[in-house]
Image (cartoon, helix red, strand yellow):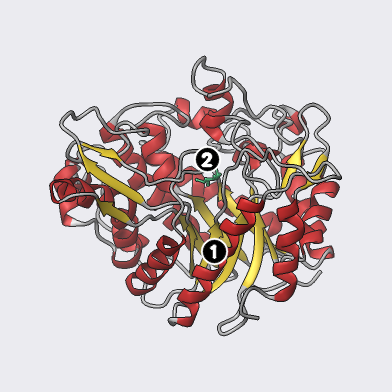
């Protein structure tokens, strides 16, 4: 089967849609899948807002053909999905479970048969639990294990997949997982979070070394513009910017950590953690860069170091601050600012000197209360949000930024991590219980936008 290609320079903006394994697949014990940190985290009382977990999710593991039809029905050029490491290596190392790989083989073939480019992400947060038991991302061996796993997946799919994303939003894995503790594995260890960040980047670089040559390799980051609400919040805003943005930018583009960050995080100057050569491997490890964008971060001053808003301790070492998003907010409490996407794209294109970019996620959580006569959700605000962000992407292109694609988050209403099923980002509603798929108005609208080639065809 022929491989479809990553959009070429100068080609029209290409459109896609995304999902992630733990959020949609369910079937957590099928075909020899091992446990992930999200299976164990969700089992801990109080971790998930509605007490739910991903054991059923959208049932996508058993409904592959239905979901591929929904992807194809959008007319998108590519589908961004993630491979669940615990399906491929139930113990996180060594033994390979062929039945897990068989599933992703069917995903890839099913996409190609429908003329859709597969864009797999190798790690969207579902670390095999045995690796967490051995220390998780704060331990260097996890990076080596990730590269081994990446090689195994590429060995099976690499004849048909030429574009890979290694990690999804490593900031979340490191700082929500190991500092704030609001994502799996739920640890609150500031030094551990910095060690995790380093090992995630190292794991990416080691994986890229294995995959490149035959394939184009990217990473998916979630940068945000960081805005100080007042002069006395500027130091905190700089620290937030260092942790959210520059840590990843500087390591991947220049092979260094920002100096102001190493002051906040002495762990990053410890040469038992950051070994000679590590940073050199990260520099230039990218053929393309994925940007997930949802909201800008507004930082206000706070007196009390614990007063850090909705994401406590996610920025360890930063001066006391709180978040002050400006309304109207989305259902999940995020500010809407499409201009922030344009700002981020321009910034990274400078930082990475013209590296091809892709908006790998963008979307909105809504209550989805309005329905049309046919009973389907009428989500006008979702169409508005997507339209404004596609327009921002096109403005960045017009300004010379080499952004090749735009990917809507997400195909299906799904398991939204610590928020459970309450937060709905999908173009398609998934009925509780029956798991029946019901396209929302935004699904039809997005298909039309894709068909038209965007706002500037
Ligand atoms: C991103 C995640 C994605 C989804 C969206 C809403 O941070 O990558 O899985 O949860 O947010």
Q: Position of residue 347 (x, y in %)?
A: 35, 68
Quadrant of image for the C terminus:
bottom right
Instruction: Identify the residue at image location x=62%, y=38%.
Output: 367
Of badges 1 and 2, the one in the foreground is 1
Q: Is residue 408 left or right of residue 146?
A: right
**Residue 137 appears in the figure:** yes
10 Å crowding of disc 2: few (<14), some (14-19), many (20+): many
- The quadrant in which residue 407 appears is bottom right
Instruction: Identify the residue at image location x=76%, y=42%.
Output: 371
10 Å crowding of disc 1: few (<14), some (14-19), many (20+): some
Closer to us: 380 or 86: 380
**Tag 2 secondary structure:** loop
Kindly report the distance in space between the C-alpha atoms of the residues bearing marks 1 and 2: 29 Å
Q: Is mark 2 within 8 Å of ligand 1?
A: yes
In the displayed image of the protein, which residue is found farthest to the bottom?
10
Q: Position of residue 271 (x, y in %)?
A: 20, 46
Q: Is residue 27 left or right of residue 40?
A: right
Q: Compared to 54, does 51 lie above or below?
A: above
Residue pointed to by mark 2: 125
Quadrant of image for the N terminus:
bottom right
Closer to us: 380 or 261: 380
Q: Is residue 360 left or right of residue 206?
A: right
Q: Mark 1 near mark 2, Cβ–Cβ under 8 Å?
A: no
Instruction: Identify the residue at image location x=39%, y=28%.
Output: 181
Q: Is residue 422 left or right of residue 262?
A: right
Q: Which mark is residue 388?
A: 1
Q: Position of residue 386 (x, y in %)?
A: 59, 59
Q: Compared to 389, does 82 lie above or below?
A: above
Q: Compared to 376, does 118 lie above or below?
A: below
């Amino acid at each position: 089967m022929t491989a479809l290609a990553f959009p070429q320079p100068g080609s029209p903006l290409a459109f896609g849609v995304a999902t992630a394994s733990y959020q949609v697949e369910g079937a957590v014990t099928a075909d020899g899948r091992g446990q992930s940190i999200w299976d164990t985290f969700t089992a801990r009382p109080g971790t998930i807002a509605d007490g739910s977990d991903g054991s059923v999710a959208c049932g996508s593991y058993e409904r592959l053909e239905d979901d591929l039809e929904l992807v194809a029905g959008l007319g998108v050029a590519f589908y961004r999905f993630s491979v669940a490491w615990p399906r491929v290596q139930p113990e996180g190392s060594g033994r390979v479970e062929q039945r897990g790989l068989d599933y992703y083989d069917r995903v890839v073939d099913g996409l190609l048969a429908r003329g859709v480019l597969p864009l797999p992400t190798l790690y969207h947060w579902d670390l095999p639990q045995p690796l967490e038991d051995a220390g998780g991302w704060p331990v260097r061996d996890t990076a080596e294990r990730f590269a081994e796993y990446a090689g195994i997946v590429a060995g099976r799919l690499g004849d048909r997949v030429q574009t890979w994303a290694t990690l999804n939003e490593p900031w979340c894995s490191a700082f929500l997982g190991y500092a704030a503790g609001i994502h799996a594995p739920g640890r609150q260890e500031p030094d551990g979070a910095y060690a995790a960040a380093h090992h995630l980047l190292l794991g990416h670089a080691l994986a890229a070394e294995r995959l490149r040559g035959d394939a184009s390799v990217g990473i998916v980051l979630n940068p945000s513009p960081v805005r100080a609400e007042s002069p006395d919040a500027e130091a905190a805003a700089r620290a937030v910017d260092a942790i959210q943005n520059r840590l990843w930018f500087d390591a991947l583009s220049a092979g260094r950590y920002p100096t102001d960050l190493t002051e906040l995080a002495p762990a990053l100057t410890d040469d038992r953690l950051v070994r000679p050569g590590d940073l050199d491997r990260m520099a230039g490890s990218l053929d393309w860069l994925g940007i997930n964008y949802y909201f800008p971060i507004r930082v206000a001053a706070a007196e009390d170091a614990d007063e850090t808003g909705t994401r406590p301790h996610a920025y360890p070492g930063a001066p006391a601050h709180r978040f002050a998003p400006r309304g109207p907010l989305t259902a999940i409490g995020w500010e809407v600012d499409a201009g922030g996407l344009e700002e981020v794209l321009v910034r990274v294109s400078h930082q990475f000197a013209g590296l091809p970019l892709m908006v790998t996620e963008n979307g909105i959580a809504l209550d989805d209360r309005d329905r049309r006569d046919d009973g389907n959700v009428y989500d006008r605000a979702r169409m508005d949000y997507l339209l404004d962000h596609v327009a921002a992407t096109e403005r960045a292109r017009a300004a010379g930024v080499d952004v090749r694609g735009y990917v809507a988050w997400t195909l299906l209403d799904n398991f939204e991590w610590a928020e459970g099923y309450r937060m709905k980002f999908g173009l398609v509603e998934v009925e509780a219980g029956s798991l029946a798929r019901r396209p929302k108005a935004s699904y039809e609208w997005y298909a039309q936008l894709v068909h038209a080639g965007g706002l500037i065809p």
